[in-house]
Image (cartoon, helix red, strand yellow):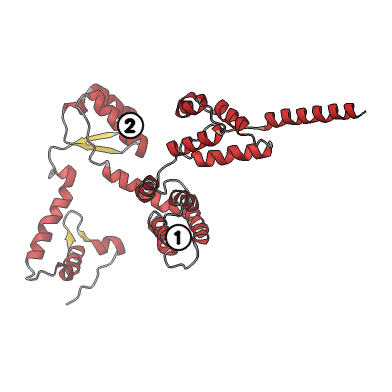
């Protein structure tokens, strides 16, 4: 009876050991953060009740890629009894970032990007370790946040954890489509203005047509009029076919001062400069409103009306 009990206990222990072996799931070696990787590995050993150095070492060697094995090859071939501890120490010293490198990365090698502020703070804490005070870390973290967030948090006396929660909430609000709708419109207008003068590499008809379509039409749709001072590339059959297909009217000009381009502006510049010269003062900001009032009240020769008459259907009374 006792012999049967001993066999049952032995079988039970063997089955338990086999189950523990199956339950150990070691993740791939994390080269950037080996200390975190070893923490996970040893948590698996603890769950599986593995405490023997040799067993730990065998699991370690079985998991590591060959490119990492070469770093501990001498330990594998040695007669050391604590091979796991030696291998762990070697891998940590080889791949763990030095304090100097971590501090340098903390100062210049990390930014918010698409992370939440709280995640940025956690990464900075990991890099800082015990080498930087919380006050210094707070300053570095705030400096990496957008002004719209930093200017709100900088006056707060909350601790870093509470600040990171507040920063996340502000970040989420600022990232909503409603907040950025006006900004998006402004950006679109800015892009339009920037693309008014578009550099085209080459003057072949295919190059011009492709650039016109890919950089303008697909972004801003079809223009009603194209004014150009270029030459034969716009007369090519390919570009004319593209213009007809898109229903675009083409107008050519020869220079900046041509009436088709900036004639109205040039007509306005001459009398404006003359009016300014009539005032013996350098304080342009003081006289400009009066000068502009004169222009608005002047009769438009081509229309036969003043601006107020066209807008308000009445003649305005001028001062004096």
Which quadrant of the rendered structure holds the N terminus? top right
Measuring 13% from the left and 60% from the top, which residue is drawn there?
Answer: 272
Measuring 13% from the left and 37% from the top, which residue is drawn there?
Answer: 254
**Which badge, 1 or 2, comes first in the chain's sequence?**
1
Measuring 51% from the left and 26% from the top, which residue is drawn there?
Answer: 78
Q: Is residue 224 left or right of residue 106?
A: left
Residue hosting label 2: 214
Neighbours of disc 2 within 10 Å: few (<14), some (14-19), many (20+):
few
The Cα atoms of the two marked residues, 1 and 2, are separated by 51 Å
Which quadrant of the rendered structure holds the C terminus? bottom left
> Farthest residue toward the bottom?
320
How far across and how far down the image is residue 56, in percent? Answer: 60, 32
Along the viewing direction, whichever of 168 and 76 lies nearer the viewer:
76
The answer to whether residue 134 is above or below residue 95 is: below
* Corner quadrant of residue 219: top left
How far across and how far down the image is residue 231, in percent? Answer: 15, 29
Residue hosting label 1: 134
How far across and how far down the image is residue 52, in percent? Answer: 64, 34
Measuring 10% from the left and 69% from the top, which residue is drawn there?
Answer: 282
Numbered mark located on residue 99 in the image: none
Along the viewing direction, whichever of 193 and 236 lies nearer the viewer:
193
Q: Is residue 68 visible?
A: yes
Neighbours of disc 1 within 10 Å: few (<14), some (14-19), many (20+):
some
């Amino acid at each position: 009876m006792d012999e049967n009990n001993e066999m049952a206990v032995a079988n039970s222990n063997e089955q338990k050991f086999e189950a523990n072996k199956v339950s150990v799931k070691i993740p791939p070696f994390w080269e950037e953060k080996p200390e975190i990787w070893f923490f996970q590995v040893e948590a698996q050993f603890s769950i599986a009740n593995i405490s023997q150095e040799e067993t730990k070492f065998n699991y370690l060697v079985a998991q590591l890629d060959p490119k990492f094995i070469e770093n501990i090859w001498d330990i594998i071939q040695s007669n050391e009894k604590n091979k796991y501890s030696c291998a762990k120490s070697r891998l940590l010293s080889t791949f763990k970032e030095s304090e100097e490198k971590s501090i340098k990365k903390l100062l210049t090698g990390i930014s918010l990007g698409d992370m939440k502020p709280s995640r940025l703070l956690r990464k900075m804490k990991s890099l800082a370790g015990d080498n930087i005070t919380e006050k210094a870390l707070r300053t570095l973290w705030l400096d990496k946040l957008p002004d719209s967030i930093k200017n709100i948090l900088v006056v707060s006396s909350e601790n870093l954890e509470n600040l990171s929660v507040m920063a996340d909430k502000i970040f989420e609000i600022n990232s909503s489509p409603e907040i950025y709708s006006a900004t998006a419109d402004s950006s679109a207008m800015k892009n339009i203005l920037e693309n008014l003068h578009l550099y085209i590499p080459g003057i072949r008809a295919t190059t011009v047509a492709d650039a016109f379509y890919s950089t303008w039409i697909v972004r801003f749709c079809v223009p009603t009029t194209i004014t150009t001072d270029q030459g034969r590339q716009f007369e090519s059959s390919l570009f004319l076919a593209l213009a007809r297909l898109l229903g675009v009217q083409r107008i050519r000009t020869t220079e900046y001062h041509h009436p088709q381009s900036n004639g109205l502006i040039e007509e306005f510049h001459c009398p404006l400069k003359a009016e300014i010269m009539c005032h013996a003062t350098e304080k342009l900001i003081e006289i400009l409103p009066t000068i502009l009032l004169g222009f608005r009240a002047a009769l438009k020769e081509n229309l036969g009306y003043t601006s107020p008459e066209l807008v308000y259907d009445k003649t305005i009374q001028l001062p004096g």
